[in-house]
Image (spheres, helix red, strand yellow):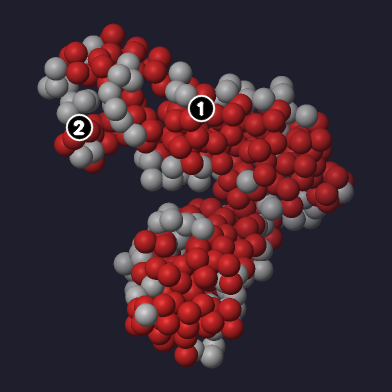
Amino acid sequence: MEEASLLLDTLPPAIRKYVEPSSPIPLRLMAAKGALPLTPSNFATVLFLLSFDLIPEIGEAAQLSARNISEKFMLSIGRDESLPKEVLDWLLELHWANTSHAKLLIANPVVSDEAIARCASRCSTELLELICLNQLRLLRHEDMIRQLCQNPNATPVLVDSVCELAVRSGVKLEELPAMQAARLRVFGKNSVAPAPSQTASDKADAEPPTMLQLANEFTSITDEKAAPLQEGIRLTLSQKVARMSVAEKIKLAMRGNKEIRTLLLRDTNRLVVIAAVQSPRITEAEILSIAQNRTAPEEVLRIVFQSKEWLKFYPIKLALTKNAKVPPAVSMRLLPALRESDIKALAKDRNVPNAIQTMARKLTAQKKV
């Protein structure tokens, strides 16, 4: 498998020696059986790679070990957002029927939408309810809605609520009876068929643009290196984006460049804003700008300060500590990790909350003792 070979190249030599095809078969077999001292995350990665081993006995042993991962190890693995998506997806494929294990994996944002959709096609009602809590996933990956609706474990109430959310957000999926019924409930009978007098051209103009249509019309909006749009073109783009459905805006947030993300971060719909912040293409500089923004929505700031990845960057950590919109409890947790010079500056900064200023003074005083 190509993803396995690519993942092998990213492993440190100390771990790679357990999975390389050139390594002794007994060593690989010991690793596949879980007989080597590895951290939970390294154990999961090693088992994933060994599951593709050309020696059938090793591949089968790795699969068996992965299916029998202990609760303690899965608790660590399932919450680890640094693990590769391929590893987590593979584990969900193996553990979708294990409610406690699957819950951890479904809640991990690294797990792909495709893996969640496959799980939604067959999992229990309890897991379906958990999947439905993540509205952003549902709207950016329509097949998840399709699979959920076709799962016999999905209750009518659950299907109705998901389909109504989808319909209100502009998702079509007209082939699904549940979506047709939801459209009738939300918009009434007149929403089912277009007016007879409408021409095809009129209908196209009246329909909100899709992400693909916009990307075809404004080809630079998916290119991170593209030059800024001219004012007139930017205005036209903004007007068309404003007409898009919530679902299409979410897709655009995942594919668009910085100019698009900046536009969507000002959207009135919280799911669209969250999608822009969580875009896999967003940069450190953009996150820093959000962390410094004292008018940023609290939910957006929460995404930033709860991310271990973004908190690795010192300027972001400092900006969050200074931002009055960030809860004081969070700022005070970040404060001791700042440089002494920054703590001293915060002790004198009247623009930060009193609690932060007071704690900064205490930390400064302690270092003088």
Asked if residue 350 lies left or right of residue 220, the reply is right
State how many labels appear: 2
Which disc, if any, is residue 281? Answer: none
Image vertical order of residue 152 relative to residue 128, above or below: above
The residue tagged with tag 1: helix, strand or loop? helix
The residue tagged with tag 2: helix, strand or loop? helix
Reading the chain from its start, which is encountered first: label 1 or label 2?
2
How many other residues sit within 10 Å of disc 2, few (<14), some (14-19) or many (≥20)?
A: some
Which residue corresponds to the image point at 44% horizontal and 42% vertical from the top-left? 80
Q: Residue furthest top?
A: 57
Which residue corresponds to the image point at 67% horizontal and 41% vertical from the top-left? 132
Question: CA–CA distance between discs 1 and 2?
Answer: 25 Å
Image vertical order of residue 192 relative to residue 120, above or below: below
Residue 134: image location, x then y, percent: 63, 46
Asked if residue 18 lies left or right of residue 185, the reply is left
- Mark yes or no: residue 289 visible: no
| Quadrant of the drawing holding the N terminus | top left
Asked if residue 17 lies left or right of residue 363, the reply is left
Residue 20: image location, x then y, percent: 18, 26
Name the foreground residue: 198 vs 114: 114
Which residue corresponds to the image point at 23% horizontal and 38% vertical from the top-left? 11
User: Which residue is label 2 attached to?
Assistant: 16
User: Which residue is label 1 attached to?
Assistant: 71
Image vertical order of residue 369 relative to residue 89, above or below: below
Image vertical order of residue 40 relative to residue 337, above or below: above
- Amino acid on which the number 1 mark rests in the picture: Glu
